[in-house]
Each structure stands twice: as C-alpha cells, then as structure tokens.
Amino acid sequence: MRKLFVHSFGCRASQADGAAIESALSARGWDSAPAAANANLVVLNTCTVTQAADQDLRQTVHRIHRENPEARIVVTGCYAQRAPDEIARIPGVAMVVGNTHKVQIPDLIESDVPYHGQIHVGDIFEQQQFLAAPVEDALGDRTRPNLKIQDGCNNRCSFCVIPFVRGRSRSAPADQVIDQVRTLAAKYREVVLSGVNLGRWGREHGFSEQPVRLVNLVRRLLDETPVERLRLSSVEPMDFSDELLELMAGSPRIARHVHAPLQSGADTVLRRMFRKYRPRHYADRIHKARALMPDCAVGADVMVGFPGETDAEFEASRAFIDSLPFTYLHVFTYSARPGTPAAGHDSQTPPPVRKERNRILRELAARKNLEFRRSMVGRTLSAVTLDDGPVALSDNYLRIELATPRPHNRIASIRIGGVGDGVLREHSPLAIL
C-alpha cells in the first residue's frame, strides 16, 4: 500500500507547503487517503505560533498512533524546526523534518534508511534559496489553491518565533510564479498568493538587478496569465502602498480584500511589540483602501493580553479597532514563545484577563461583520463557487449560501437577498416572504 494523508496546521503559507508536499509525493506514486486512519504514511505539517498549536500537534499524533499504530508518522514544519528532539520523543513519530529539509521529504521517505528516530533539521539562517516545492496542481477538489511565493521574515517582533523557524525573507522568482499561476489558472478560477511576509516579496538583497515590489509581480500576473481572480493573503500594513491599492482598485481580476495585521491599536503596546508602525499609520492605509474600494473586505490579526497590557491600553486598542471599517478580525490571545523577548517580560497578563479581552474583541468583530453583511443585501456580488456545498465566496470575502446548487469552481454574479448565521443568502424569487 502507498496511501498518504497530509495535514497542515496554521497559516496559508503552511497550507501551501502541505499542498506542495502532497503534490510531490503524488508524483512518486502515493495515493491520497481520506483520513489518517486509512493511510500507511501520515505527514503532519506543523505550526508553532502559539502553545495551543504545539499542543494540537501532540494530541493529533497521539490520536493517529492510537487509531492507526502501523502508520508511519512524519512531522515537519515550524514546530519540527523549533523543537525536533521534543517531537521525536512523542510515541508514534517516525521522522522529524525541519523547514530546512522540507523539500527533501519525498527522497527521505523513500530512502532505505530505517525511519525510527530520524531527525533532519539544519540551520534555517543558512538557507538562501526559496525552499517551497513547486505546486503544479492543487490536489483534490479545492477551488482556491494557495500559492506560496515568499517565505521567512526579517522583522523581529518581540512576541514572534516565526523568523527563527522560517529564516530570512526569501522570494520565489517572478518567472516561476508566473508559470505556476498560468498552470493553476488553466484549472482554477481563483488563485491565492500567500507568504510568511508577503509584502516583502522581491525585497531581499540580490534578488533582482532592478528593484522590484509585490505590485510589480501582481501587474505582471495580470498581464501575462489568464487568471480570472487573484487574492492577496495577509500583507503588512505599510506594504499596502498607494500603488498596490490603486492597482487592486482598478482591476476586477483582483479580489477586493485587504488583510493587514494590526496586533494592537495602542501605540505603547505596538512599541513594546517592536512593530514598525503607529496606529495613525495603520489607519491611513485602511482609510486609503476603503476610499479606493468602498466595499472591500478589511481584516486584521489582533492580539490581546500582551505582557504589560494595561486596562487603559486595551481600551485604546478596542476603541481604535471600533473606529475603523473592519469587516472581520482574527483575535488571538498572547502565547509566550520560547526565546522571544516578550516571554521574559516580568508583567504577564493574567489568563482570565486575556480571556475576557478576547471575548470583547470577538463580539466587536461579530457586530462589524454583521453590519457589513447587511450592507450587501440587494447588491450583486462577484463570487467563486466552492466545493463544500451550495456556497460561494465573494471577492470581498463573504460566504454566500446559494439558492440552488451550481457547478463549483466558477465565478458568478450573485444577487444577495438576505443574511444568515455568518453568511449571506442568495436572492431567490421563489422564497416565501
């Protein structure tokens, strides 16, 4: 049997890595299994951004090993890069492969060396090339493949361990990205460009003879590929330049979707986080985006409970968030990461306070999202039909329940008739009022 199950935890870049691993192993003759219980090879592509992410991996390994003890479990990704010995001690783990060796997984799996106890992890800061394996196709029936075009991060936010497990910023060559998008566009209507710090694509020293920016790549993708819709995943706020926002606003082939990590709306907290902007800078970018694209989705990552966060600082952050036209938030509770400056701060926010602040911001986000959805009623939105039921995703990042099933992987104009629980509903002339 050569039955494979790949599961990725965490961000879009991790999801893209998992798709690349699955694609590479499929090319070697491995067939995808519907679940880990049906596989004799399980690859777990990990995240380590929080303690909860680490715990999720450990629980997943224990469950798979209990339910399918014959399966060979290979653990890779960010947690594997950070703590390989810790993972190797988990019962059932046959091999640990860090981000430094991720593209070698097919060769490592098919080598004659016994699996048990293998650890393949190197110095991530010695890596210069872009490590992701090329994704020739998105496996299964996905309708919105993620294409990772950037990896690593040169920032040193005081709470973040990711630069130490992903390494320095590295970019996929422009011609390679164009070829991959052209290939994906032959099958899929929407392609999502992702990265660990996507807005830094092309910025590393020696990448190109002429200075290039993400906006230059996006313009080439529009000019040189038939892709019907591009969507940018998370981009740091100050990388949403006027030029990039104007290009997004001027092309119907780019999703009206701005996701800019905020972390905190309090100036003092941003300074302790070592973030490179102040609230006024962030607000300027959001207002610029909305002025150019009045109906665009606006999302942010927000952290609560950062060490030393006072009641006044949290209220400043909450009020700042309330003042901006966010349509959704990803709210995270601070989690100490080994080796980061914030982890050694002598004023850690008590867990009950963190939990309450998380609740407050989630409720704020839910209210803003409901207001945004209600504003879409009676409008006609461009959306791509998905494969997980009679549902579509609008270019401004709203899920739409379809009145009647449609073929998936199509871009359609859908008139909105109402709102549901977290979704929009397509107008149906047959609906009983």
Image (cartoon, rainbow, N blue to C red):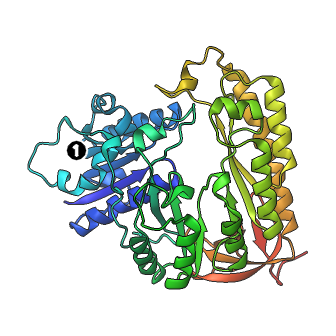
Residue located farthest toward the front when viewing the structure as drawn? 209
Q: Residue 152 or 63: which is nearer the viewer?
A: 152
Residue at 42% across / 67% down in the picture?
Answer: 209
Taking the spot 26% from the left edge, 52% from the top edge, the residue there is 41
Q: Pinpoint residue 180: horizontal percent, then vertical percent.
A: 41, 74
Q: Residue at x 84, y 32 (%)?
A: 315
Task: Evaluate whether residue 403 shows in this view.
Answer: no
Q: Nearer the viewer, residue 283 or 428?
A: 283
Report the number of numbered marks: 1
Quadrant location, the N terminus: bottom left
What is the residue that sits farthest to the left in this orientation? 112
Residue 323 falls left or right of residue 56: right
Residue 184 in sight in this render: yes
- Residue linked to disc 1: 70
Q: Position of residue 288 (x, y in %)?
A: 79, 62
Q: Nearer the viewer, residue 426 or 353?
A: 353
